[in-house]
Image: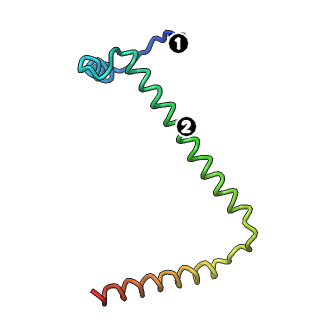
């Protein structure tokens, strides 16, 4: 059996009631088991959060490292206007076919 470390946990009454009810319903063998599951979920959440942050940082770095020249505000406006015009035409074409 794996070594164990004992903790004392203080929680609000509503959480304690829910924890006891979950154990009494047979979802867990003990409150310790339920709390261990909650800590595992917390660990997974932290890992997933760290992975999302790393992906965002990588995307930012890729953008910073992009060798293409920066666009001016006028170029951005022009590109967006063209994109919206194409989307509008495609929507109108789809509507006229229906």
Left or right of residue 19, residue 4 in this image: right
In x, y percent, where is residue 71? 68, 76
Q: Secondary structure at mark 2?
A: helix
Q: State the mark number for residue 55.
A: none
In x, y percent, where is residue 3? 54, 10
Left or right of residue 75, residue 19 in this image: left
In x, y percent, where is residue 75? 64, 81
Contact (Cβ within 8 Å) of mark 1 with mark 2 = no
Q: Secondary structure at mark 1?
A: loop
Left or right of residue 77, residue 87 in this image: left
Point 25% across, 17% down: residue: 24
User: For the residue carrying disc 2, how many other residues have a C-alpha within 10 Å: few (<14), some (14-19), or many (20+)?
Assistant: few
Image quadrant where residue 67 sits: bottom right
Point 36% across, 87% down: residue: 92
Left or right of residue 54, residue 94 in this image: left
In x, y percent, where is residue 1? 50, 10
Q: Nearer the viewer, residue 12 or 23?
A: 23
For label 1, the residue is 2
Image quadrant where residue 70 sits: bottom right
As measured in the structure, the alpha-carbon distance from the residue carrying label 1 to the one carrying label 2 is 23 Å
Point 29% across, 18% down: residue: 23
User: For the residue carrying disc 1, how many other residues have a C-alpha within 10 Å: few (<14), some (14-19), or many (20+)?
Assistant: few
Point 51% across, 31% down: residue: 43
What is the quadrant of the C terminus in the image? bottom left
Q: How many marks?
A: 2
- Look at the image and name its color scheme: rainbow
Seen in the picture, residue 89 relative to 34 is either above or below; the reply is below
For label 2, the residue is 47
């Amino acid at each position: 059996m794996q070594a164990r470390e004992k903790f004392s946990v203080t929680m609000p009454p509503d959480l304690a009631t829910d924890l006891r009810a979950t154990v009494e319903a047979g979802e867990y063998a003990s409150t310790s088991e339920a709390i261990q599951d909650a800590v595992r979920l917390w660990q997974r959440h932290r890992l997933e959060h760290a992975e999302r942050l790393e992906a965002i940082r990588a995307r930012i770095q890729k953008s910073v490292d992009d060798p293409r020249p920066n666009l001016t505000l006028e170029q951005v406006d022009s590109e967006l206007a063209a994109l919206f015009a194409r989307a509008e035409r495609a929507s109108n074409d789809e509507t006229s076919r229906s």
